[in-house]
Image (cartoon, helix red, strand yellow):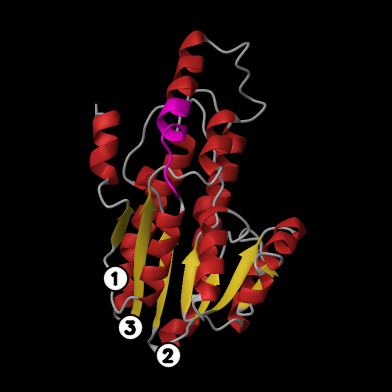
Amino acid sequence: MPKTVLITGAGSGFGRGAAIELAKRGHKVIAAVLNDQQARELKKAEPKRTANLTVVKLDITSAKDIAKVDKLKADVFIANAALGQTGPLSLIPLKRLRGVFEVNVFGTFAITQRVPQAMRKKRAGRIIVTSSIGGVRAGVGSGPYTMTKHAIQAFGTALRAELKMFGVDVCLINPGPYATGFNDRMANDPGPWFDRKKAAPEDVAVMDQLVQRITVGQMDPSEVVKRYVELVEAETTELVNFVPADIVERMAKSMPAR
């Protein structure tokens, strides 16, 4: 049965791919993007086959924007919007780190708290929260991002248990490194606060190791899009959904725990 699916961060990467694929499969998709450029590009994406796709601008850090979800009446909500950030934790400015938490944790929390109010009343619905392999593992250089995903992992875990009593299903999806461009931007551009020419050799080595770990050998993002679709359409879900299923074992071999 077709469902109304609201997905944030639909302007690029997994969110964009999932929005288009779900619309093709007959679901009514409300694709939330951050800016006009993303909206224009998504509206042009195979327009003849995405009649079920509605694009809206929505900033998850804006209380005014978040209030819009009350009228959308989603059967499924995919909390996918996120900001990437890397860099040595002993150097990153606190203001910069706060900004990542504002989007990835507090913004995600705010909209994910708002959406299930209607679901609680009708005793039905599903929430899919996008975490990451970084939600269960952390490595050098990725601390600013993986800290936020560890928080999201805890959030989704607790929320699933709490909303189950209201008939609302909550699950997490934890992708590994996929070639959406997100990892490349995050690894190669930590921001103007980190100057490779002036940084200590040890800090440069941290960033070089990070680039190697999360940008080399990235996989086809269609695997993750497929998993999003499966989670939307499934009768029931598991709490944690790694993509690929063995990503924890793969990462353990490449980055042994210390």
Q: Secondary structure at mark 2?
A: helix
Residue indicated by mark 2: 122
Q: Quadrant of residue 209?
A: top left
Q: Quadrant of residue 210?
A: top left
Q: Residues within 10 Å of mark 2 (few under 14, many from 20)?
A: few
N-terminal of the two: label 3 or label 2?
2
* Residue name at image x 48 percent, y 37 percent: 144
Amino acid at pointer 3: Gly
Residue indicated by mark 3: 167
Residue indicated by mark 1: 237
Residue 89 in view, yes or no = no
In the rendered view, would you say 196 is above or below 87?
above
* Residue name at image x 48 percent, y 72 percent: 77
- Disc 1, disc 3: CB below 8 Å? no
Queried whether the magenta region covers residue 142, the answer comes back as no
Q: x and y percent of residue 106 in the render?
A: 53, 56
* Residue name at image x 47 percent, y 81 percent: 75
Question: Viewer-nearest of labels 1 and 3?
Answer: 1
Amino acid at pointer 2: Lys
